[in-house]
Image (spheres, rainbow, N blue to C red):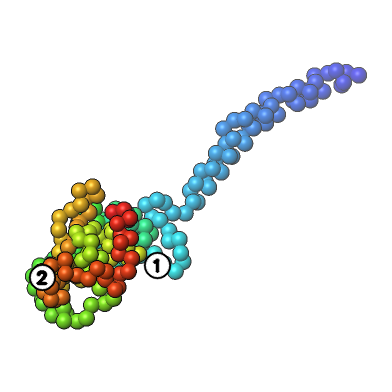
Amino acid sequence: MSNVAGPGNDARPDDAAGPENAAWPDDAAGPEGTDGLKAHGTEDSRAEEPGTQDEPEPEDPEFHELADDTELEHALEALLLVVDAPVDEASLATALHQTPSRIRQTLHRMSLAYTADRRGIDLRRAGEGWRFYTRDRYAPYVEKMLMDGQRARLTRAALETLAVVAYRQPVTRARVSAVRGVNCDGVLRTLLTRGLVEEAGTEEHTGGTLFRTTELFLERLGISSVAELPPLAPLLPDIDAIDDLDS
């Protein structure tokens, strides 16, 4: 019949391949198709990622976020009070989950505040690190207290450290710590303050500070030279092992 081959029915097969239906495959590959959806999904997921490198999140829920500047200053004080040597900004930043730049700014602010308030302690940058020091104005009082404490009996740790210095002087801090098996920085500072040991230059190969005993040490023992010391110190039976240790 005329309806089968007529123009009215011919429109149906043409419509199946016409522009309205052909747009679907084109859209699938176009900017508004699947790729476009994936791109939008990626952008959304990135936008939802919490935190940035400038604002690190604490790894342990027990740690405070330290968003407040005053609280960060208090945390830095707590760390700097227990260190034996200057600590660099990166180490402090890692310990407190902060950026080095914020740590640096806070330390500078604290240092200025301590100076302005004329506090007894001074926060200084020494080399690549920061540390508390006694303010020069009050150093004589500190020295007097420590010197008066010379009458106090030396601890076993101090005696062992003093024995290492006496029998192998001049000796580096590293060797003293190696033979005792512990860090001796604090004990050496005590012996230096009490005037029993003193610095004696640096070692040629390592650049480490050398230590030796003083005249006061000999005076306290009632001898005129270290040659009069006994062959071995009772507190240090393995003294000869120090020769085999690297500086």
Q: Secondary structure at mark 2?
A: loop
Q: How many marks?
A: 2
Q: Report the residue marked by disc 1.
A: 64
Label 2 crowd bin: few (<14), some (14–19), many (20+), radius 10 Å = few
**Mark 2 or mark 1, which has the lower sequence index?**
1
Q: Estimate how packed mark 1 is, as few (under 14), some (14 to 19) or many (20 or more) residues with alpha carbons within 10 Å.
A: some
Say which residue appears at 59% left-offset and 39% top-offset: 37
Q: Which residue is mark 2?
A: 224
Kindly indicate the quadrant of the structure image that contains residue 115: bottom left
Q: Give the distance between the C-alpha atoms of the residues marked 2 and 1, in whole angstroms.
A: 58 Å
**Is residue 105 in sight in this rendering?**
no
Residue kind at label 2, given as amino acid type: Ser
Image-based side of 238 in relation to 197, left or right: right
Residue 56 lies, in percent from the top left, at 40, 56
At x 44%, y 54%, the residue is: 51
Judging depth in this view, the residue of 184 and 229 nearest the camera is: 229
Q: Quadrant of residue 1?
A: top right
Q: Amino acid at mark 1?
A: His
Q: Secondary structure at mark 1?
A: loop
Q: Quadrant of residue 173?
A: bottom left
